[in-house]
Amino acid sequence: MSARAPRPNVYISVDIEADGPVPGPYSMISFGACVAGRQDGASYTAADPERDTFYRELRPISAAFVPEALAVSGLDRDRLVREGAEPGAAMAEFRAWVREVSAGAQPVMCAYPASFDWMFLYWYLMSFGGDSPFGHSGCLDMKTLYAAKARVPLRAAVKRLMPAGLLSRRPHTHHALDDAIEQAELMSSLMLWQPLHPPEPHAPETPTA
């Protein structure tokens, strides 16, 4: 029997804003998501990142926050306490959205970098509803993707050192949906990028007697 072909992947760019370094003691106060593109086998098709989007501002889950972290987002925490979406309801709406936009495919969360955003997103999905549409490891880190394609150390996988043609021309605003859309354009650029590497140096020939 031949092996079953893997399902296509739908890549969903996610950006989160938080009021501290880790979920639980601190809160995810907003998050945005958009469809970046679809991979079917070796073929990748970029999506219009403004077409399918999701955004919520959340009520904080604790009284603790780091002022410097909160300031990055520009959000008013007192307003979020009064008006922010209840996390359980927001995560249920997000799960439904992910499953709708990825129907027939496997959704994969992607971010630059993914570690911080995935940590908060997965914690919230499991803490408020106990289910992740991405599974427990369905995330792709764009820094790692660039480092592997460019053959550079991970610490050199920074935007200021990337070829300009890979980068989105959108501003990085720290509004979660704006930044998710910006990331989606970088994701598609990276997936479609075929870098030209110089040939590996040959070992010097040993002279023969």
Image (cartoon, helix red, strand yellow):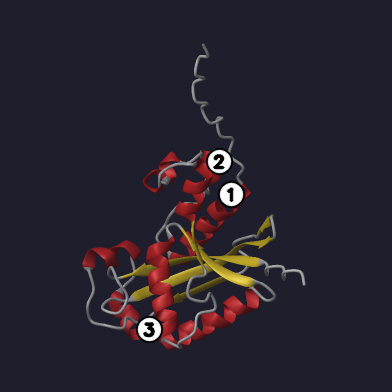
Position of residue 178 measured from the top left corner of the image (x, y, whole percent): 48, 61
Amino acid type at circle 3 is Glu
What's the mark number on residue 165?
Answer: 2
Position of residue 124 measured from the top left corner of the image (x, y, whole percent): 40, 80
What's the mark number on residue 83?
Answer: 3
Q: Viewer-proximal residue, 98 or 135?
A: 135
Amino acid type at circle 2 is Gly
**CB under 8 Å between callouts 1 and 2?**
yes
The residues bearing labels 2 and 3 have C-alpha atoms spaced at a distance of 40 Å
Position of residue 196 measured from the top left corner of the image (x, y, whole percent): 59, 35
The residues bearing labels 1 and 2 have C-alpha atoms spaced at a distance of 8 Å
Which element is circle 1 on?
helix
Q: Residues within 10 Å of mark 1 (few under 14, many from 20)?
A: some
**Residue placed at 55% from the left, 30% from the top?**
198
Position of residue 105 measured from the top left corner of the image (x, y, whole percent): 66, 72
- Answer with mark 3 or mark 1, whichever residue precedes in sequence: 3
Question: Between tags 2 and 3, which lies in front?
Answer: 2
**Residue placed at 58% from the left, 39% from the top?**
195
Instruction: Report the residue that reaches farthest toward the top.
Output: 209
Q: How many marks?
A: 3
* Residue 63 in view in this figure: yes
The residue beneath circle 1 is 189
**CB under 8 Å between callouts 3 and 1?**
no
Q: Residues within 10 Å of mark 2 (few under 14, many from 20)?
A: few
Q: Viewer-proximal residue, 126 or 94?
A: 126
The residues bearing labels 3 and 1 have C-alpha atoms spaced at a distance of 37 Å
Which element is circle 2 on?
helix
**Residue placed at 65% from the left, 60% from the top?**
47
